[in-house]
C-alpha cells in the first residue's frame, strides 16, 4: 500500500515538473519547492544519523576516552552558524580559514600530481615508433598538436599573429570547438536520458504499460 | 512572415511534443538496434572479471535522484557483476541522497519479482554460521544450504550481508574520508548504515583498508571522480573506474588517456554497453533499463538531428544569415 502511494506521489510530481514545458503553473512550483525542501530535509536527517550522532554526540555522552577533543571540531562547526548574526558573523571566518588551510595543505600536492603532472606526462608521447599502426600514430599527432594549439590560444603575452602564434591559435580555436561540440552532443544525450528515465517510470513502474 | 520565418518561429511546445512522442513510441515498437561495447567499458568489465571472492571492490553511489536515470543502471550493472562473481562490495555515497540511491539499487537486485534476482541474507540470519568460525564464501554457502535453505528457481545467487556487501552510506568531505580509509575503513565507517560493526564483518577482516581493495567504481553525477583519482589512485595506487553522466563524460576522458582509470561508462550508453557485456556473458537473462532506453535515445537523436538540419535550411534559405534579427518571437 505504502509503495503504491509512493508511486502515485512520484508520478504526480513528475507530471507536475514536466507541466512547465506547457507553461508555468502552481503544480510545477509546488513540485519544485518540494524537491528542494525534501532534499534538504533528507540531507539533514542522514547527516545527523550518519555523522553527528555516532561521531560526536554518542562519544561525548558515553564519556569515551579523549572525547573532549571532539569539542574542538564541534565548536568550529558551531561557529559557522554565527554568519546568521551580523554582530558576531566575523567568527565564521575561523572555521572557513581552517578548512581552506587544511584543504590546501592536504590537497595541493596530490591535486598537482593527479591533475597537472600526470596529464603532462600523458601528453609527452612518441608521435611514431617502429611497428606502431597508422591510426595510433595519427591519433598521437592529433593529440599532441591539438594540445599545443589549444595552449597557444590561451597564451596572451604575444599577439596572435604570424605563422606560429597566428596559425597555432586558429588551430587551437578549432580544437576547442571540437571539444565543445563533443560536450554538447553528450549533453543532448544526457538530457534525453533523463527524460527516458522518467518515461520508463511513468509507463513501467506506475502504469505497467511497458516492461 | 514567409514559410522560412514561420519555421524558425514555431512554438517550442510543438518541439517538446515531438520529442515526447519520439521518446514514447519506441518503447512499444522496439527496434533492437545493436550496441557495441567500447574499449573503456570493456576495461571495467575485464577488471572485475579478473576478481573473485578473495578480492573486494568499492562501489560509490555518488549521485542524486536528478541523474539517477543515467547513473542508476551503471551502479546496478556493476553490482550485478560483482554479486554474480561473489566479490565483496563496500557501498558508499558521496552525497546524502546517494545513500538512498544505493539502497534502491540493492533493492532492485534483490527484488523477487525481478529476473535474475539475488536472495539477500540478513546479517542476523547467518549468525550461526559465523559462530562456527566459517567465513570463506564457499564455506558460508555450503553451510547455509546444509541448514535446509535452497535457492529459489529464478534467483541467481545469495548475497550474505557482511560477507558480500556492506552498505556504508554517506559521510561528508568524502575526499578526506578516502584519505582516512587508506589507513583503515573502520576508522571512517565504524558501522554500516544498519549499525552492524564493521570489525565483525568477514569482508572487513580480509580487507581492512583501501590498500587491500582491488577497484573503486564511482557512479557519479558530481566531482566524486576527481576525489577518487586524487586521493585513491594517486595516493595509494588504487585502481579507479568511472560511471559518469553524459554531460560530464568528455571532462573525464583525459583520465583514460593518462592511464589513471581502468575505464569509464559515459551516460546511458555506457550503462547499456555494460548491460550488453553482462547479458552476452551469461550474467543476466534480460537486458536492463539502459539497453531498452538506448532504442528510444537513438530515435530521439535522429529527430533532433532532423530538426537541426531543417532549422539550418530555413535559416540560410530565408537569408536570415544576412539579417540582424528575425521577426516574431525570436
Image: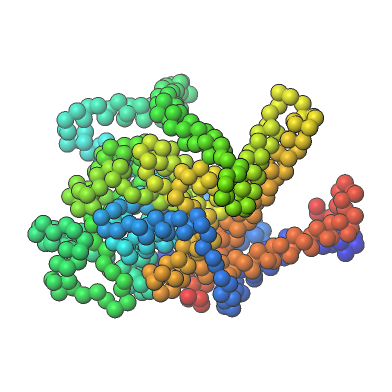
Q: Is residue B181 visible?
A: yes
Left or right of B271: which side holds A153? right
Display coloring: rainbow
Q: Is residue A198 above or below residue B112?
A: above
Number of numbered discs visible in the structure rendering: 0
Horizontal and vertical percent position of residue B162? 23, 55
Instruction: Please tell me which residue is depicted at 64% across the width and 69% down the height of the picture.
Output: B299
Q: Is residue A155 above or below residue A50?
A: above
Left or right of A149: which side holds A91? left
Instruction: Please tell me which residue is depicted at 51% across the width and 77% down the height of the picture.
Output: A209
Horizontal and vertical percent position of residue B158? 26, 67
User: Depth check: B242 or B234 in front?
Assistant: B234
Q: Residue B102 lies in what quarter of the image?
A: bottom left
User: Depth check: A178 or B22 in front?
Assistant: A178
Instruction: Please tell me which residue is depicted at 11% across the width and 62% down the height of the picture.
Output: B128
Q: Quadrant of the N terminus of chain B?
A: bottom right
Q: Is residue A15 above or below residue B184?
A: below
Instruction: Please tell me which residue is depicted at 42% across the width and 59% down the height of the picture.
Output: B45
Horizontal and vertical percent position of residue B206? 22, 49
Q: Residue B284 lies in what quarter of the image?
A: bottom left
Q: Residue furthest left?
A: B132
Horizontal and vertical percent position of residue A58? 22, 38
User: Depth check: B149 or A115 in front?
Assistant: A115
User: Depth check: A55 or A123 in front?
Assistant: A123
Q: Residue furthest front?
A: A130
Q: Is residue A34 visible?
A: no
Left or right of A150: which side holds B44? left
Amino acid at each position: 500500500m505504502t509503495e503504491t502511494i509512493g508511486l502515485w506521489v512520484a508520478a504526480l510530481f513528475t507530471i507536475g515538473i514536466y507541466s512547465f514545458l506547457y507553461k508555468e503553473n502552481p503544480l510545477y512550483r509546488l513540485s519544485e519547492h518540494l524537491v528542494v525542501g525534501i532534499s534538504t530535509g533528507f540531507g539533514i536527517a542522514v547527516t545527523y544519523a550518519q555523522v553527528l550522532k555516532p561521531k560526536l554526540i554518542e562519544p561525548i555522552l558515553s564519556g569515551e576516552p579523549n572525547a573532549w577533543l571532539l569539542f574542538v571540531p564541534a565548536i568550529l562547526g558551531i561557529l559557522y552558524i554565527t554568519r546568521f548574526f551580523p554582530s558576531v558573523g566575523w567568527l565564521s571566518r575561523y572555521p572557513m580559514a581552517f578548512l581552506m588551510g587544511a584543504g590546501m595543505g592536504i590537497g595541493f600536492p596530490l591535486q598537482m600530481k593527479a591533475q597537472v603532472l600526470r596529464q603532462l606526462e600523458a601528453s609527452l608521447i612518441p608521435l611514431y615508433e617502429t611497428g606502431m599502426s597508422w591510426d595510433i600514430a595519427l591519433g598521437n599527432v592529433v593529440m599532441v598538436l591539438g594540445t599545443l594549439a589549444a595552449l597557444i590560444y590561451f597564451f596572451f603575452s604575444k599577439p596572435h599573429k604570424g605563422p606560429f602564434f597566428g596559425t597555432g591559435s586558429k588551430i587551437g580555436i578549432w580544437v576547442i570547438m571540437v571539444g565543445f561540440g563533443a560536450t554538447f552532443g553528450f549533453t543532448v544525450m544526457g538530457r534525453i536520458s533523463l527524460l527516458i528515465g522518467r518515461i520508463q517510470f511513468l509507463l513501467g513502474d506506475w502504469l505497467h504499460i511497458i516492461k | 512572415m514567409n514559410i522560412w520565418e514561420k519555421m524558425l518561429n514555431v512554438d517550442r511546445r510543438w518541439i517538446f511534443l515531438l520529442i515526447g512522442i519520439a521518446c514514447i513510441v519506441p518503447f512499444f515498437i522496439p527496434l533492437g538496434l545493436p550496441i557495441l561495447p567500447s574499449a573503456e567499458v570493456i576495461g571495467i568489465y575485464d577488471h572485475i572479471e579478473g576478481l573473485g571472492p578473495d578480492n573486494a571492490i568499492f562501489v560509490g553511489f555518488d549521485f542524486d535522484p536528478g541523474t539517477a536515470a543515467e547513473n542508476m543502471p551503471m551502479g546496478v550493472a556493476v553490482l550485478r557483476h560483482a554479486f554474480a562473481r561473489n566479490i565483496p562490495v563496500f557501498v558508499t555515497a558521496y552525497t546524502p541522497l546517494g545513500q538512498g540511491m544505493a539502497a534502491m539499487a540493492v533493492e532492485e537486485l534483490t527484488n523477487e519479482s525481478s529476473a535474475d534476482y539475488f536472495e539477500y541474507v540478513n546479517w542476523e540470519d547467518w549468525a550461526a554460521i559465523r559462530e562456527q568460525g566459517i567465513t570463506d564464501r564457499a564455506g558460508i554457502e555450503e553451510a547455509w544450504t546444509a541448514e535446509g535453505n535452497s535457492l529459489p528457481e529464478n534467483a541467481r545467487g545469495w548475497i550474505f550481508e557482511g560477507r558480500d556487501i556492506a552498505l556504508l552510506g554517506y559521510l561528508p568531505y568524502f575526499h578526506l574520508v578516502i584519505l582516512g580509509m587508506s589507513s583503515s575503513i573502520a576508522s571512517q565507517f565504524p558501522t554500516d548504515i544498519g549499525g552492524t560493526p564493521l570489525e565483525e564483518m568477514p569482508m572487513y577482516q580480509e580487507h581492512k583498508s583501501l590498500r587491500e581493495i582491488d577497484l573503486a567504481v564511482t557512479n557519479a553525477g558530481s566531482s566524486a571522480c576527481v576525489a577518487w583519482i586524487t586521493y585513491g589512485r594517486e595516493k595509494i595506487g588504487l585502481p579507479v573506474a568511472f560511471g559518469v553522466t553524459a554531460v560530464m563524460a568528455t571532462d573525464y576522458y583525459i583520465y583514460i588517456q593518462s592511464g589513471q582509470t581502468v575505464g569509464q561508462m559515459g551516460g546511458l550508453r555506457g550503462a547499456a554497453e555494460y548491460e550488453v557485456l553482462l547479458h552476452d556473458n551469461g550474467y543476466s537473462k534480460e537486458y536492463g533499463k539502459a539497453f531498452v532506453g538506448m532504442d528510444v535515445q537513438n530515435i530521439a537523436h535522429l529527430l533532433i538531428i532532423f530538426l537541426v538540419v531543417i532549422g539550418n535550411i530555413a535559416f540560410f534559405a530565408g537569408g536570415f544569415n544576412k539579417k540582424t534579427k528575425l521577426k516574431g518571437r525570436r
